[in-house]
């Protein structure tokens, strides 16, 4: 008997992670129903940045240009003391992953509103139900029955779906329902977040500044849309009650030289830092993503973005499983691939926090600033370096000298007819093998090619711009980026996943990686 499903996937929570999940699924023709407790977008700015990896995800969703209009480039990061000594600085070089800079400043309520507006254009595939909470998840061999309650009336309803993504934040009810435990620490120190409207420009406002101090370390950041934020820890004797009115908040800003001529206070709130992670991100057909799966301090600017990357990774796999293009065992790669990245950014945030709070020793800071010698991959500070995949559906060694697990650069390329565009727009959204001035299909054994054919892979030769193209499945390296990048790692061909990570290379075998997986170590 054919079962009725109200949607392919239920999304619990419709913040940035939930909206990105819906957009990813809809981009592949997969339907989603989202349940969100709050009728309106949370009005406070929480996340403050996105980087070029996240922007590449937006590009893949067809919304990159729209999001770029509501965010602003970030110039650099610096760590300074109150006497003006600069401890550390990270300049942002041009991005290798897309057309813009490495980092952007955002004002989350505005960007989130634009994300939701983009999702509304997929009305036939994305059904959002506001003012509703999920109370029960019951799964069986074929799907999940979702029971919800209307917040205002208490009315209960059920929906039948094939899979569920729990993107319902740090207090996730989904996590509790699947019996996953949140492990780690919540720090005792309480912080006040002060959001302001900018009245005038002041020197170096476009730098993200971390004021390093044991008593009052401060995050000082220009947000987009004419906003600015300060994050300041309360001292042990201070409580929320000490900052009940705007006049109570102003002394914190004036201590840093900020006056009423510079800004007007818009709002303020209090929070504590977490470094916690769920012990499992999946129970059968139910998955956790974003803050439901992991919570990290803000110092690396990666909390919201890590959630978006979670659901983009899970979304393209779920879509292909639902359409019969991939086996369900592919879903086992989700946590295997995303957990190491979440752990990396959590650890990086903790490490940077020690610098800001003057807990790191001079030797530790010197080590953070140390530039390794004789590397194959040009060194960049971990905070801004292009992403790597350390585990999951990849074949071959990983590390400095390896191309496997790296994200393919995205220069402007040309096709055989002279069309010029960013690489992703020319590759499509599937698996692809790229050859350095050679047809990559000729480097495969018959059984290897059969594996890639079964995945619907394309085979594309990358030609130098100084030579003729020879056939329809070729691209020209107009920016002279792709061929030098392949040559750096001594490879003739790579296999690239839909999310643009290199899954395999000819030097270690171009056969499709196997399932199940074992974790690699970079």
Image (cartoon, rainbow, N blue to C red):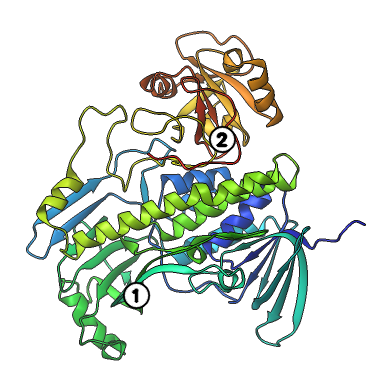
- For marks 1 and 2, the one nearer the N-term is 1
466 vs 197: above or below = above
Q: Is residue 249 left or right of residue 456?
A: left
Quarter-wise, where is residue 244 in the image? Answer: bottom left
- At 46% from the left and 32% from the top, the residue drawn is 408
Instruction: Please give the residue where the numbered disc 1 appears in the rendered image.
Output: 272
Q: Is residue 103 left or right of residue 502?
A: left
**What is the distance, in whole Å, between disc 1 and disc 2 at their CAs?**
38 Å
Residue 242 location (% of width, % of height)? 26, 90
- Residue 65 visible in the displayed image: no
Residue ranking furthest to the right: 1
256 vs 68: above or below = below
- At 48% from the left and 71% from the top, the residue drawn is 170
Give me the disc on residue 497: 2
Give me the disc on residue 229: none
- At 73% from the left and 75% from the top, the residue drawn is 147
Residue 229 location (% of width, % of height)? 31, 68
């Amino acid at each position: 008997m054919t079962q009725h499903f109200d949607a392919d996937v239920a999304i619990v929570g419709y913040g940035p992670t939930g909206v990105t999940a819906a957009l990813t699924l809809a981009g592949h023709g997969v339907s989603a129903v989202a349940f969100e407790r709050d009728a309106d977008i949370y009005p406070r700015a929480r996340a403050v940045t996105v980087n070029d990896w996240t922007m590449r995800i937006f590009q893949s969703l067809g919304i990159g240009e729209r999001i770029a209009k509501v965010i602003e480039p970030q110039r650099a990061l610096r760590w300074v003391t109150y006497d003006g000594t600069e401890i550390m600085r990270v300049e942002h070089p041009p991005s290798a992953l897309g057309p813009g800079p490495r980092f952007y400043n955002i004002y989350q309520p505005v960007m989130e509103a634009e994300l939701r507006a983009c999702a509304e254009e997929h009305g036939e595939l994305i059904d959002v139900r506001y003012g509703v909470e999920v109370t029960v998840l019951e799964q069986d061999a074929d799907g999940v029955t979702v029971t919800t309650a209307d917040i205002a009336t208490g009315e209960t309803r059920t929906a039948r779906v094939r899979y569920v993504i729990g993107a319902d934040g740090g207090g996730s009810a989904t996590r509790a329902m699947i019996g996953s435990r949140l492990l780690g620490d919540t720090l005792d120190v309480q912080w006040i977040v002060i959001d302001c409207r900018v009245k005038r420009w002041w020197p170096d406002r476009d730098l993200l500044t971390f004021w390093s101090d044991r008593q009052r370390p401060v995050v000082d950041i220009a947000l987009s849309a004419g906003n600015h934020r300060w994050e300041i820890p309360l001292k042990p004797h201070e409580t929320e009650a000490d900052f009940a009115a705007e006049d109570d908040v102003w002394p914190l800003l004036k201590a840093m030289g900020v006056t009423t001529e510079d800004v007007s206070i818009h709002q303020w709130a209090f929070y504590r830092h977490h470094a916690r992670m769920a012990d499992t991100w999946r129970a059968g057909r139910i998955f956790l993503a974003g803050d439901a799966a992991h919570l990290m301090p803000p110092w690396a600017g990666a909390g919201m973005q890590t959630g978006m990357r979670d659901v983009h990774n899970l979304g393209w796999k779920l879509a292909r499983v639902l359409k019969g293009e991939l086996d369900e065992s592919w879903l086992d790669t989700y946590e295997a691939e995303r957990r190491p990245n979440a752990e990396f950014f959590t650890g990086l945030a903790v490490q940077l926090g020690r610098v800001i709070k003057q807990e790191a020793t001079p030797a530790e800071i010197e080590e953070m600033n140390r530039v390794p010698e004789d590397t194959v991959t040009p060194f960049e500070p971990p905070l801004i370096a292009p992403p790597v995949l350390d585990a999951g559906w990849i074949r071959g060694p990983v590390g400095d000298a390896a191309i496997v697990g790296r994200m393919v650069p995205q220069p402007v390329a040309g096709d055989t007819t002279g069309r010029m565009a960013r690489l992703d727009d020319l590759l499509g959204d599937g698996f692809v093998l790229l050859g350095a001035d050679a047809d990559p299909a000729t480097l495969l054994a018959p059984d290897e090619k059969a594996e890639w054919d079964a995945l619907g892979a394309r085979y594309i030769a990358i030609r130098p711009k100084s030579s003729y193209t020879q056939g329809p499945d070729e691209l020209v390296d107009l920016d002279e980026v792709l061929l030098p990048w392949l040559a750096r790692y001594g490879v003739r061909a790579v296999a690239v996943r839909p999310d643009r990570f290199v899954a395999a290379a000819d030097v270690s075998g171009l056969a499709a990686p196997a399932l199940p997986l074992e974790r690699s170590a970079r």
